């Protein structure tokens, strides 16, 4: 059976997400926490003058990539949690893509497990951010 990538949206989505995650890691490695030269700024902080729950994530990620985990926690206490979410998702994108190609008879079940599992991992990782948004709305 010949595989045509354009006929496999699941694989395209996995490749796209894996690419975005790799770019996040490269971004974290390129921009130095010492120079504080991050091109992405917090819009919330610029508008209100107050830090938000995600302030310091870029700095935190850069420190985690450099192995300075304790210092990363001081920049954003949720940084490691979000970083591990991206690591897990990168591993899952690659693993599920391999299983998708290797076991074509289980593709439907694999996609369902992927969606449910990734949704749960997302909620666990981003709960502080979700809670903060809900709190601000109410």
Image: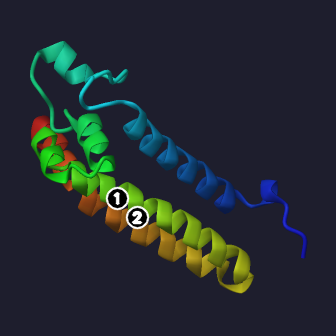
Q: Position of residue 38 (x, y in %)?
A: 33, 24
Q: In this view, does 15 lie to the left or right of 49?
A: right
In the displayed image of the protein, which residue is found farthest to the right?
A: 2
| Residue visible at 18% across and 45% down in the picture | 72
User: What residue is drawn where x is 48% and y is 48%?
Assistant: 21
Q: In this view, does 52 lie to the left or right of 117?
A: left
Label 1: how many Cα within 10 Å (few below 14, some 14–19, many 20+): some
Residue 91, compared with residue 126, is above or below; it is below
User: Taking the image as drawn, is residue 126 in sight?
Assistant: no
Residue beneath disc 1: 85
- Rendering coords of residue 44 (x, y %): 21, 23
Q: Considering the image in quadrants, where does the N terminus appear? A: bottom right
Q: Distance between the residues labelled 1 and 2?
A: 5 Å
Pointer 1 and pointer 2: residues touching (CB < 8 Å)? yes
Q: Does 114 sit above or below residue 90?
A: below
Picture coordinates of residue 78 (x, y %)?
Answer: 18, 50
Q: In which quarter of the image is residue 134?
A: top left
Is 80 left, or right, of 101 in this rendering? Answer: left
Q: Where is residue 130 in the image (x, y as percent from the top left)?
A: 22, 48
Q: Locate the C terminus and report the quarter of the image it occupies.
A: top left
């Amino acid at each position: 059976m010949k595989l045509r990538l354009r006929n496999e949206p699941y694989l395209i989505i996995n490749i796209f997400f894996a690419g975005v995650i790799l770019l996040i890691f490269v971004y974290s490695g390129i921009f130095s926490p010492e120079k504080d030269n991050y091109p992405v700024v917090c819009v919330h902080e610029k508008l209100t003058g107050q830090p938000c729950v995600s302030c310091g994530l870029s700095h935190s990620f850069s420190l985690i990539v450099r192995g300075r985990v304790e210092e990363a926690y001081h920049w954003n206490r949720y940084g490691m949690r979000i970083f591990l979410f991206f690591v897990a998702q990168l591993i899952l994108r690659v693993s599920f893509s391999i299983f998708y190609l290797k076991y074509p008879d289980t593709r439907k079940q694999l996609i369902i497990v992927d969606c449910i599992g990734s949704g749960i991992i997302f909620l666990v990782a981003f709960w502080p951010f979700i809670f903060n948004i809900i709190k601000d709305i109410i």
